[in-house]
Image (cartoon, rainbow, N blue to C red):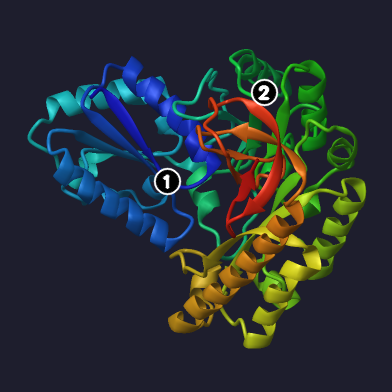
Amino acid sequence: MTVEVMTFGCRLNTYESEAIRREAQAAGLTDTVVVNTCAVTAEAVRQARQAIRKLSRERPDARIVVTGCAAQTEPATFAGMREVDRVLGNDEKLKSVAWHDTRRALAANDFGVAAEEKIVVNDIMAARETAPHLIDGFEGRTRAIVQVQNGCDHRCTFCIIPYGRGPSRSVPMGEVVAQVRTLAERGYGEVVLTGVDLTSYGENLPGAPRLGALVKSILKHVPELPRLRLSSIDSIEADRDLLDALANEQRLMPHLHLSLQAGDDLILKRMKRRHLRGDAIAFCAQARRLRPDIVFGADIIAGFPTETEAMFAHSLDLVDDCGLTHLHVFPFSPRPGTPAARMPQVARDVVKERARRLREKGADALKCHLDREVGAHRSVLVETQEMGRTEHFTPVRLAVPVEAGVILDVKMVGHDGRSLLAA
């Protein structure tokens, strides 16, 4: 074993894990596992700690380096684990000098060091640039990811991520286009643009280009790319060019994942979100007029502090009112240091029960979508020999094995409640 990376959390972490693997290997690390953590919920942190303990039992000779958002926001938590040899912050994890220093430190400390000496975590709020990492492939994946933005300038009351990622900063447009072109030349049929706050793209760049301009530039200058997809967006920030591209560029996939979080106006205000319920509904209606076959996913939090049953009902209703298909449900998790953690909490059993009801609502919405897809011909990017995804990001089970990475036009003949079944 040389370097392995265990990734938790979002697509941005998946992208960065490829850069981490390359930097760590280039620095000469061996017999090392890097755990790239997520901090979005307390459960995500717990899962990372559990994985580290299991990893140490199964590979007692491996050195364990912990990085990512949870390492940035809770470095002492991981440094205090006897299984952990090094803790790197989110800024450090992508810098070659940090990995060379890590190799030397691990070689010099075969018998362990004090917890505080394991920590290499700087002030992420001082970060002002996001350097592009020219990644030409993703191990074991047929869909490529490109980071175009990092950090967030907003302060939603429930969210710890700005303290793990720092201020919003963007990769220059020309460098993004070059990265996408490289991946298309390497045979990737789909590229996903990702960031912490994707629709804030360009605010810190000269001329302040918007996300829509970036999308149009990619599609214009990389004509050989079959499919371009966006990760989660904040609908209130969707610009005119982005909507125009959605309406007129068939290579921009008809699938948007929305950061909605709740369906009640008072809860949205207490979350310090920038949209209201009506804004979300109006955006979905507008996007559907522009691209009638569009499919929406959304993040929704169940059991936010002060949420009553009537307020929760508004979130349930939002699934139908917006026509949502792919639901990501998060039981509210108080994160120390955030304003929401100090608000009056909803009982944990109520939070879990509301999350269950939201997931059931999401499962029903997905089934309705699958029902409508039966009989349709769809373009499917094959991810494994047996599975792929349509333009709408709907999973498809293939009738016969096909080489991964191929894009097929196939007819949907049924579904199993979770995936479409192809002819």
Which residue, as the protein is rendered here, is positioned at the far left? Answer: 111
Position of residue 134 measured from the top left corner of the image (x, y, whole percent)? 55, 18
Q: Amino acid at mark 2?
A: Val
Frontmost of labels 2 and 1 is: 1
Residue 269 against residue 95 in the figure, above or below: below
Instruction: Give the side of residue 407 with respect to residue 19, left or right.
Output: right
Image quadrant containing the N terminus: top left
- At a point 51% along the width and 65% down the height, the residue shown is 338
Residue 342 against residue 119 in the figure, above or below: below
**How many other residues sit within 10 Å of disc 2, few (<14), some (14-19) or many (≥20)?**
many
Q: In the rendering, which numbered label is found on residue 8? A: 1
Please identify the quarter of the rendering in which residue 185 is found.
top right
- At a point 24% along the width and 37% down the height, the residue shown is 64
Instruction: Give the side of residue 54 with respect to residue 227, left or right.
Output: left
Please identify the quarter of the rendering in which residue 112 is found.
top left
Residue 172 in sight: yes
- Label 2, secondary structure: give it: helix
Q: Which residue occupies the foreground of this view, 247 or 340?
A: 247
Q: Which residue is mark 2?
A: 176
Position of residue 391 measured from the top left corner of the image (x, y, whole percent)? 72, 39
Instruction: Give the side of residue 63 with respect to residue 335, left or right.
Output: left
- Label 1, secondary structure: give it: loop
Residue 405 against residue 273 in the figure, above or below: above
**Disc nearer the start of the sequence (2/1):** 1
Position of residue 234 measured from the top left corner of the image (x, y, whole percent)? 72, 52
Q: Which residue occupies the foreground of this view, 101 or 137?
A: 137
Q: Amino acid at mark 1?
A: Phe
Residue 345 in sight: no
Position of residue 256 measured from the top left corner of the image (x, y, whole percent)? 73, 48
Q: Which residue occupies the foreground of this view, 385 or 79?
A: 385
